């Protein structure tokens, strides 16, 4: 750590860890409900658990991205954050808005729009919070000595993500129009601008860990940004097949979204190539595992499992089934959860001044959580394919099919337990590192 204000990042990461733990609890509530054990139904019905699970996911990922920006931007710009006090105000207000929204869901204070359940009045608070965050980051970047490609790509990703929140706030009385613009947020986030954020963090980590020249790494970054935009923007069409939009979207969505895996493949090849080219001397192997892991797992979860149901002829059958949940889990995990765990693993020793990455626990956390998540993905996939055949092809009634596939959720829960064991070890290490310290400034 070279700049004292980078310490702010630690508290954003701590908030992320807390929300991830809560997210997992709601995942188990749903997993058991799918198995037929829905004892909490009167207090936390499935729809509430689902909204809480997915919204906690989004908030912990965003909190992690913000922490990453507070760490990376000062270092890249060679400039202390313009205001540490305001960064803490932003952290607390983010946590407060998140908690109010999540508590509200338990009392039916929500909008039934998947991923955008936050009621509109709270959206305005989100906007104020994000404006404050962006103000701090951009002011630091422009006051600083340097504006590197890495820091610009990361900042552009964050800025575009904020702008793309707005289409989801427009009010429509028409269901098709509402769905149409909901995807501008959900799809253009995960298959567009979040990829820039991921690319920026990945480039930063590769520069630090592999020791390869910045020029080489940043050249690749341009290629990835280009591929993302060429495929991802019109790829939005893979959500417009059957929501009441013109038929032309079947063609546009099918063709362009089938190209999307190229961006993720580019990222995977890029990371592995830089690792092979580099000196392999950096001692923090835990951070290296997560960095290479995210590049590879995002290609599998987003690229391969995305393309598996992106063609209209397939999506006609799989839309909105557990096949979607299969892809949703490995894509979010591989791309955005793992990149967050990578930057946290890299920064913790620098923030705290304690170098605890040699214990073996870090590798155990990595393998248990990844193998557990792969197992969960397979369980969702098998349940999903069975669901598609019975419900969509044989015409068996929804509720009966759900009973038939209960058995697959026993496997899901077993794998989720392994996944959770890995995450618990990761969190144990996080706590063991302790708080940021002044001595960390001297060590670096
Ligand atoms: C990291 C990137 C990605 C993430 C985090 C992600 C996550 C998700 C999630 C959570 C959904 C469900 C959304 C909802 O119903 O509200 C979804 C749907 C979908 N995704 Fe992705 N995805 C990613 C990349 C991709 C890619 C690259 C493709 C195609 C090549 C793809 C194809 C699809 C399709 C076709 C659906 C619609 C499924 C349905 O009709 O039910 N995704 N994705
Ligand atoms: C112990 C771990 C977890 C369990 C047991 C679990 C279980 C579940 C279940 C049962 C659903 C509802 C599926 C349905 O609609 O019927 C769900 C939804 C979802 N979960 Fe998890 N989950 C876990 C962890 C995670 C993690 C770590 C992530 C992200 C990295 C995640 C991302 C999602 C997403 C994106 C959805 C919505 C999928 C869709 O749109 O179809 N979950 N989860
Ligand atoms: Fe999409």
Image: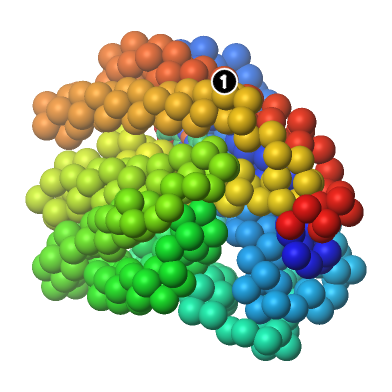
Left or right of 77? Residue 269 is: left
Left or right of 250? Residue 213 is: right
Q: Is residue 412 above or below residue 201?
A: above
The x and y percentages for residue 156 are 52, 78
Residue 374, quarter of the rendered image: top left
Mark 1 residue crowding within 10 angstroms, few (<14) / some (14–19) / many (20+)? some
Q: Nearer the viewer, residue 115 or 392?
A: 115
Work out which quarter of the rendered image holds the N terminus and state it: bottom right
The x and y percentages for residue 339 are 50, 50
Q: Residue under circle 1?
A: 421
**Residue shown at 57% from the left, 42% from the top:** 284
The answer to whether residue 116 is seen in the rendering is yes
The x and y percentages for residue 408 are 33, 16
Please tell me whether mark 1 sits on a helix, a strand or a loop: helix
Work out which quarter of the rendered image holds the C terminus and state it: bottom right
Q: Nearer the viewer, residue 124 or 309?
A: 309
Please, which colouring scheme is shown? rainbow
Q: Is residue 69 above or below residue 328?
A: below
The answer to whether residue 55 is seen in the rendering is no
**Residue shown at 44% from the left, 47% from the top:** 280
Q: Is residue 393 above or below residue 72?
A: above
**Residue shown at 61% from the left, 44% from the top:** 345
Q: Is residue 158 above or below residue 287?
A: below
Q: Nearer the viewer, residue 314 or 367?
A: 367
The x and y percentages for residue 385 are 20, 29
């Amino acid at each position: 750590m070279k700049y004292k204000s980078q310490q702010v990042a630690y508290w954003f990461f701590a908030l992320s860890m807390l929300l991830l733990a809560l997210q997992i609890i709601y995942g188990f509530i749903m997993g058991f409900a799918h198995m037929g054990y829905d004892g909490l139904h009167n207090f936390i019905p499935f729809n509430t658990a689902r909204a809480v699970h997915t919204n906690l996911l989004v908030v912990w990922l965003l909190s992690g991205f913000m922490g990453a920006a507070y760490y990376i931007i000062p270092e890249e710009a060679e400039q202390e954050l313009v205001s540490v006090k305001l960064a803490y105000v932003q952290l607390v207000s983010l946590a407060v808005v998140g908690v109010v929204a999540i508590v509200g869901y338990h009392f039916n204070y929500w909008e039934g729009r998947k991923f955008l359940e936050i009621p509109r009045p709270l959206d305005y608070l989100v906007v104020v919070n994000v404006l404050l965050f962006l103000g701090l980051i951009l002011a630091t970047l422009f006051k600083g000595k340097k504006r590197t490609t890495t820091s610009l790509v990361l900042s552009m990703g964050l800025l575009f993500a904020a702008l793309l929140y707005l289409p989801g706030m427009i009010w429509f009385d028409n269901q098709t129009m509402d769905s149409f613009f909901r995807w501008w947020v959900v799809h253009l986030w995960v298959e567009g601008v979040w990829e820039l954020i991921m690319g920026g963090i990945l480039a930063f980590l590769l520069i630090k860990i592999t020791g390869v020249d910045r020029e080489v790494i940043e050249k690749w970054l341009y290629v990835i940004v280009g591929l993302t935009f060429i495929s991802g923007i019109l790829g939005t069409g893979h959500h417009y097949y059957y929501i009441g939009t013109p038929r032309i979207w079947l063609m546009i969505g099918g063709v362009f979204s089938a190209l999307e895996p190229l961006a993720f493949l580019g990222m995977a090849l890029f990371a592995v190539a830089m690792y092979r080219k580099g000196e392999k001397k950096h001692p923090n192997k835990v951070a290296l595992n997560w960095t290479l892991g995210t590049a590879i797992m995002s290609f599998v979860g987003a690229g391969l499992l995305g393309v598996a149901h992106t063609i209209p002829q397939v999506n006609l059958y799989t839309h909105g089934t557990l096949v979607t949940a299969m892809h949703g889990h490995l894509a979010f995990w591989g791309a955005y959860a793992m990149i967050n765990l990578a930057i946290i693993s890299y920064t913790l020793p620098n923030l705290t001044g304690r170098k605890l990455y040699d214990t073996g626990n870090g590798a155990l956390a990595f393998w248990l959580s990844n193998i557990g998540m792969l197992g969960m993905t397979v369980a969702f996939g098998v349940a999903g394919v069975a669901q598609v055949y019975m419900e969509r092809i044989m015409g068996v009634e929804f509720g009966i099919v759900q009973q038939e596939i209960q058995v697959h959720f026993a496997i899901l829960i077993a794998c989720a337990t392994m996944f959770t064991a890995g995450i618990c070890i990761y969190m144990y290490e996080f706590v063991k590192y302790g708080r940021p310290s002044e001595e960390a400034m001297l060590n670096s």
